[in-house]
Image: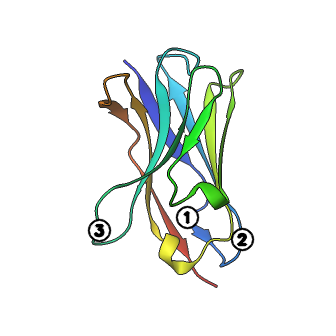
């Protein structure tokens, strides 16, 4: 059974960089999946941010690519999201998830709430 768990600060100041980590257990992040970050702002739908693939290749939503980086630590079986220059509009529940080659998200973390406030 694959499990994903997000971790990181619940509160970030405006203009700072948000860093979230997803720890994966029960499966390796070097397998043929797309390890993704997705968020849900309050009262809105899900927003896909980007993914990192089995070879460390990354792809970002045009909405976020200018200020986003996704990286990984294969030794720890973790992947991380960096979102720079945050504003209050970045307040959301952030999820990490595993996407298959068929575009299904078959495993999700429980989500972590992030608030941006001074």
Tell me which label, 2 or 1, sits earlier in the chain.
1
Q: CA distance from mark 1 to mark 3?
A: 19 Å
Instruction: Point out residue 87 in the picture as x, y percentages from the top left corner.
Output: 58, 77
Specify the quadrant that holds the N terminus.
top left
Could you tell whether 11 is left or right of 92 in the image? right
Which residue is farthest front? 62
Identify the residue at horizontal 48%, vertical 29% (top origin).
34
Residue bearing mark 1: 10
Graded by Cα atoms within 10 Å as few (under 14), some (14 to 19) or many (20 or more), the crowding at tag 1 reads: some
- Above or below, 72 against 65 in this view is above
Q: Secondary structure at mark 2?
A: loop
The local crowd at label 3, few if under 14, some if 14 to 19, many if 20 or more residues have their Cα within 10 Å, is few
SS at circle 3: loop
Compared with residue 30, is residue 9 higher up or lower down, i.e. above or below? Answer: below
Q: Nearer the viewer, residue 33 or 60?
A: 60
Q: Which residue is mark 2?
A: 16
- The percent coordinates of residue 37 (x first, y second) are 48, 45
Residue ID for mark 3: 44
Which of the 4 quarters of the picture holds residue 56?
top right
* Residue at the (59%, 17%) spot, across then down: 30
Which callout, 1 or 3, points at the residue further toward the start of the chain? 1
Q: Nearer the viewer, residue 98 or 65?
A: 65
Residue 39, which numbered label? none
Choose the circle earlier in sequence order: 2 or 3: 2
């Amino acid at each position: 059974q694959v499990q994903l768990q997000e971790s990181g600060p619940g509160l970030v100041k405006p203009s700072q960089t948000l860093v979230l980590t997803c720890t994966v257990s029960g499966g390796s992040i070097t397998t043929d999946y797309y390890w993704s970050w997705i968020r849900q702002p309050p009262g809105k739908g899900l927003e896909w941010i980007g993914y990192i693939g089995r070879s460390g290749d990354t792809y970002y939503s045009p909405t976020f690519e200018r200020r986003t980086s996704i990286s990984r630590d294969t030794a720890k079986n973790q992947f991380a999201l960096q979102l720079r220059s945050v504003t209050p509009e970045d307040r959301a529940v952030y999820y990490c998830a595993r996407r298959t080659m068929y575009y299904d998200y078959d495993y999700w973390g429980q989500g972590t709430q992030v608030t941006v406030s001074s």
